[in-house]
Every structure is written in C-alpha cells, then in structure tokens.
Image: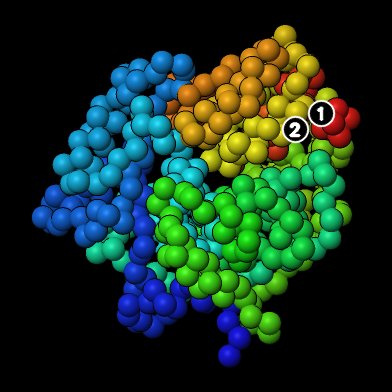
Amino acid sequence: MPRTLFEKVWQPHIARTYGTRDLLTLDRVFLHDMTSLPAFETLREHNLPVANVARTLAVIDHTVATAPGRTEETYPVMAPTVRSFRREVTERGIPLIGLGDPAQGIVHVVAAEQGAVLPGMTAVCGDSHTCTNGALGAIAFGIGSTEIAHALAYQALWLPRPKTLRVTVNGVLDPRVSGKDIALAIISRFSTDGGTGCAVEYAGSAISALSVEERMTLCNLSIEFGSRIGLIAPDDAVFSYLEGRPRAPKGAAFDAAVTAWRGLASDDGARFDKEYSIDAGSIAPMVTWGTSPEDAIPVNGAVPELRDARDQSQRSRWERALAYANLQPGKPIQGTPIDVAFIGSCTNARLSDLRAAARIVDGRKVAATVRALVVPGSSSVKRQAEAEGLDRIFRNAGFEWHESACSLCAALGPDVVGRGKRCASTSNRNFENRQGPGSITHLMSPPMVAAAAVNGAITDVRTLA
C-alpha cells in the first residue's frame, strides 16, 4: 500500500498503540534555557534519571544578551535562569552548547548545523518552532514542559496520531521571492488553522527548487499554519548539506544512510487526508500588516477593508489588529515608516539569509530614523559571514552586528523593539507585544527587511534588487 513520507517516519517509531494514540520513540530531545527547568523539577520529584543523555542536547539561546562581549551574566534579569539551566544539564551529564562554545546558536539552527537531526528521525524540543528540522525529512515538533520531563525520562511520548496534509507548490518563483514568502502566502491563503491537527508535507517543483535553508524557513512556520509538524522529502540537496556535519555519520556509514534516506518520499498514490495547492508564480514578496501571520499581503497590496473579512469573528480581530498596528483599511502597506529593522531568529538568520540581505544593503545606508541590527542564527553563521565580509557590508551601512541568540524574535532577553515602535522583522510571530510591550511587528523576508532599513519604510524589494 502506498505510504506518505510522514507514515514512513512515524510508523517505525511506534512502540505501542492505544486507540488513536501512539507511544512514539524519540531519537533526539533538545533543551534550551527557557522551558526546561520545570521538567527538571518533575524529574527530581519522581527521582527519575535522564534516559539517554547521548540523544539529548542542550543549548543556551533564548534569554541571553546579544551585544558584543556578552556573557551569561550580562542580562541580570535572566542570569539566574541561565545558571540554573547550566547546573541542571551539567549535573545530569547532558551535552551543553553554551555561550562561548563555537557551535553556540539558536537551537533550531544548531541542530541542523551539527547534523544532530537526520532524515527519518524523530525529535522534540520545548519550543514550537522545532518543526524547522522537518526540512531534513525528520518528524520534529515542539512540546510543553510536562512532555519534556516525559521525553527525558522515557525517550518516548504518547501522542495522538495526526492526519496528513500535503501542500503542493508548483511552478517557478520570481527570483526575489523566498521560502519566507511562500510560507506567508500559504498561511494567508489557508489561515492559521489550515494545518491544524495535521502533519504537513510540502511538495512540488517550487519546493524542490528551494535551498535547504529556505526549506527550513518554510517548515519553521508550519506552527503558524496550525501544524506542529512540517516536513519535506530529503533529496540530494539535503544529503550534500548533511555530509561532513559533526554529528552526521561518516564515510561508508553516511553512504549507507543516504541509500536508506532515498526511500523517504511519499509513494505515488499515497493518500493524504487533505490537499492544498498554490501556484508559485502567483507569490509576490509578502509582508504582514496585523497581529497574526495570517495577516499577510503582497508588499504592493493594500491593508484589507473590514468588509472583506470572511465572518464577524475575523472582522472583530481585524478591527483590533488595525488599532494595535495603527493602520488604515484600504491604504497601501508600502511606504509605512519603520523604526527598527531586525534580521535574526530561527526562521531567517542563516548564512544564505544574511547573504541575501547583504546584497540589498551593499553600497547603501540605513535610514537615519531606523535602528537596524543583524543577529546571526549561530556563532558558526557569524564566523562564516565575517569570513565573507558580510559583517563589513552591514556595519558600513549602519547595521549593528550582534552575537547569536533569539534576541528580538521573542524579546526574552534585553533586546526589545520599544513601545509604539514599528519593526520590519525576519522573525516568525507578529502577535501583540511579541517583540516587547507595545511593539508592532511586520514579518517579511531578509531582503525585504534590508530594503525597509535603507528606505526607512516598508518597501518592495523588487524596486531595489
């Protein structure tokens, strides 16, 4: 019987089934400094050890400063949390990538860079954007603190078996349209509930043409589509990306793994519970206007009129979003002034993102009214970018060049946008107060943020490229 990619990964990991719930064995458990401490407390209360430290990896990323020269103590508000996290993982023998480690970075960036997630694996982390790693052909998803404790203690979780949804994107993208634009186009068209209850497989010629890092961006935003799991069939691009990574198999073992990984694709005739499709040629550079990733429009479009809401619930939400974002219905989004430009986050802070933004910035200056900063997704990305001279391009233009961490994506460290300030951001969420109290967030791709930074307003990158 033809099987989907999801079924080919999920089924071999089932240890037991009870009704519609499966006990899923886990290949990797990732931890970070924000959500793991309650889980350690649970382990202590029940006198439970960590089941497999070799399959567990801890990263410090969420609550630390990013200013040059930062340490774990730079942000006093969260320093006790970081110290406690370091002590807990160290006492249990869990490998830790902390500040000062050359591999340090945002957990969803580090996991792939290290080859800690491979095609066909299952992986969890106390962070909803763990779905990023589905770009490698893995089932990776975010969990809560109670589930973290269970995952650490038993290397397995009881889970409801999700339905399957395939989103097919065929056609050819405009060269100035990215994986971020595809994701925002899908979410705006099918809503933030479009993938709820489903494992989403992205397929089609436009998806196959994406770089591995752009696929990560697309899978990263699956949770904003309502799905905990987004995945893409691994191909030669993925195998090349993984070869030589520190934790990936080496030599003959890698070749054998690739042979097995080639079978991780949905069979012809495999049945999905739902199917969506979208024409790649119809996608323009996208930007959000409101307080949901669903509130995305082409950059040359206009803020929607309230009469266009699909129902009263959406109309009410739009009214609140318009008031929060201080925008008028029917007005062009292009030309809206910004105060802050942020290139960072687990969504868009990889080397290819920085290269794409630098191409727009090169030879230009950040507008005098804008604070612009680049926060690389990892120390490795930072080093590679500096080796290519990207930091010089950004600094010459007036960007700040920071150390790696989550920074302005979640504003859990000292980096915040400011009350009433408007930010062009490569991050993943534009909820009220997401980038600090009273902040206004417009999600867009790295080149779009670069264009907004130099023009001081939301700009169609196609006018600068």
Q: Is 118 on the left or on the right of 153, as rendered?
A: right
Would you say the residues marked 2 and 1 are in contact, meaning their CB atoms lie under 8 Å apart? yes
Q: Nearer the viewer, residue 339 or 384?
A: 384
Q: Is 155 on the left or on the right of 240, as rendered?
A: left
Label 2 and label 1: CA atoms lie apart by 7 Å
Residue for point 78% across, 16% down: 364
> Residue 426: where, in percent of width, then height?
64, 35
Residue for point 32% across, 77% down: 15
Tell me, for residue 323, which label it has, or none: none
Residue lying furthest front: 251
Residue lying furthest bottom: 1
Q: Quadrant of the C terminus?
A: top right
Q: What's the residue type where badge 2 is placed?
A: Met
Q: Secondary structure at mark 2?
A: helix
Residue underneath mark 2? 448
Q: What's the residue type where badge 1 is placed?
A: Thr
> Residue 286: where, in percent of width, then height?
77, 42
Any part of residue 262 in sight: yes
Q: Nearer the viewer, residue 221 or 364?
A: 364
Tell me, for residue 459, which label it has, or none: 1
Residue for point 81% across, 28% down: 459
Quarter of the rendering containing residue 439: top right
Any part of residue 442 in sight: no
Q: Nearer the viewer, residue 230 or 112?
A: 112
Q: Is residue 256 above or below residue 34?
A: below
Q: Nearer the viewer, residue 396 or 344?
A: 396
